[in-house]
Amino acid sequence: MLAARTEQYIIFRLVQEKLAIDIREINEIIKMEPITAVPNSKSFIKGVINLRGKIIPVVSLCRRFGLAESPPDTRSRIVVVHYRQEAIGIMVDSVEKVASFHEVEPPLESHEVQGVQYMDGIGMCAGELISILNIGRLLSDG
């Protein structure tokens, strides 16, 4: 078991899963807006948006995890994170809340779990297990 953490996380939903990102890695959360496709980009890049005059790439977590994408709805959001001095958007189905985890377990070591290589650990919140994403690994080329 890892040490207790007092950091805060944004908990969001992707398909039927609840995931979390450290709040310190998030610039802002915006409503879904039209995304312009970019030819010949990485498979998990959905496209780009214009955020107050700045072009921001948008990542599809569904594509990154090999899941079927559902069409965006009124609850869909783009979580804008900072990665290597750049702003990058991450599409999520909905943002649930801000939470802290008292204990964080290491992620499962099974290679059969989709996306486990992008996780820092698993936290417990209101009786639910929530996977904590590692933004560096999630957005790296590897």
Image (cartoon, rainbow, N blue to C red):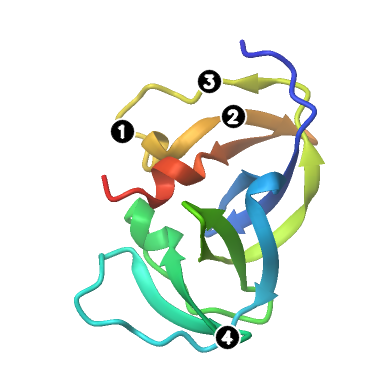
**Where residue 97 sits in the image (x, y, percent)?**
79, 53
Q: Amino acid at mark 3?
A: Pro
The label shown at residue 106 is: 3
Cβ–Cβ under 8 Å for marks 4 and 3: no
Which circle's residue, 1 or 4, is located before the other in the chain?
A: 4
Q: Residue at x 35, y 48 (%)?
A: 140
Which circle's residue, 2 or 3, is located before the other in the chain?
A: 3
Q: Amino acid at mark 4?
A: Glu
Is 49 on the left-hand or right-hand side of 46? right
**Where residue 34 sits in the image (x, y, percent)?**
51, 89
* Residue hosting label 2: 122
The label shown at residue 81 is: none
Q: Residue furthest top?
A: 1
Q: Which picture quadrant has residue 116?
A: top left
Cβ–Cβ under 8 Å for marks 2 and 3: yes
Distance of label 4 from label 2 (alpha carbons): 30 Å
> Label 4: how many residues lie within 10 Å, few (<14), some (14-19) or many (20+)?
few
Q: Which picture quadrant has residue 33?
A: bottom right
Distance of label 2 from label 3 (alpha carbons): 6 Å
Distance of label 1 from label 4 (alpha carbons): 33 Å
Distance of label 2 from label 1 (alpha carbons): 16 Å
> Label 1: how many residues lie within 10 Å, few (<14), some (14-19) or many (20+)?
few
Please count the marks in the image.
4
Q: Secondary structure at mark 3?
A: loop
Q: Could you tell me which quadrant the N terminus lies in? A: top right
* Residue hosting label 1: 112
Distance of label 1 from label 3 (alpha carbons): 16 Å
Above or below: residue 118 compared with residue 54? above
* Residue hosting label 4: 33
Which circle's residue, 1 or 3, is located before the other in the chain?
A: 3
Q: Which picture quadrant has residue 127?
A: top right
